[in-house]
Amino acid sequence: MRIGQVSPTQEATITRRWGWTTVCTVLLSITGPLGLVVMNVLQDRADEETALACRRDRANASWSKGFDQALPVSLFVLLVVAVVLALVILVVGRRVPIWGKPVTAVALFVALVSGLQVGLIADEYDDYPGGDISSLNGPCGA
């Protein structure tokens, strides 16, 4: 065997590793839409609790997102890792399985789109809800 040549066994091992890297990239990309759904459910529950608190005791009602800021920030970090892995697979991966590059391209798109939305949620975490000035007096309005 010459220098630089790879045996069939080594070739299969390399291809298998690229395959698992592709699977990990897809799983990381899926966390974006799933995380958005979870944050939406938590926000809806917090809104229901705020509305209930407004009906019971307006003075003690408070705003809540339903989740800590660590959730969108950590989700954003996972999506950045997914984007980096996807780009490595698409650019460098010569021995990726035949299904790897198309699946990775879709995963890259999903990670970019959901990463943009998660980034906006993380950036706007401390903003007050509501579009009009009356909502600034409290969660129950003026």
Image (cartoon, rainbow, N blue to C red):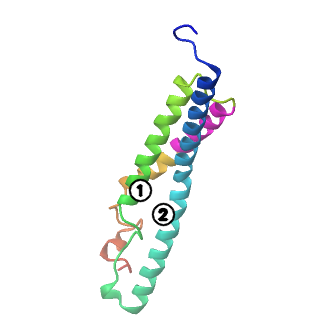
Instruction: Give the left or right position of residue 62, taking residue 52 as reference.
Output: left
Question: Relative to 21, is 79 above or below?
Answer: below
- Binning the other alpha carbons within 10 Å of mark 1 as few (below 14), some (14 to 19) or many (20 upward) gives many
Residue 13 pos. (x, y %)? 59, 30
Q: Quadrant of residue 57?
A: bottom left
Q: Secondary structure at mark 1?
A: helix
Number of numbered markers = 2
Along the viewing direction, whichever of 93 and 45 lies nearer the viewer: 93
Extent of the magenta region = 99-112
Q: Report if residue 13 lies within the magenta region.
A: no
Circle 2 crowding by C-alpha within 10 Å: few under 14, some 14–19, many from 20: many
Residue for badge 2: 39
Q: Please indicate whether residue 15 sits to the left or right of residue 38 in the image.
A: right
Disc 1 to disc 2: CB gap under 8 Å:
yes
Q: Residue 14: x, y in percent?
A: 57, 28
| Residue drawn where x is 54% and y is 41% of the image | 25
Identify the element where label 2 is drawn: helix
Which residue position holds label 1?
72
Q: Is residue 82 above or below residue 59?
A: above
Horizontal side of residue 49 vs 111, given as left or right: left
Query: In the image, is 58 to the left or to the right of 34?
Result: left
Name the residue rendered at 40%, 59% in the picture.
Answer: 71
Check disc 1 and give the amino acid type: Pro
Quarter residue 131 falls in = bottom left
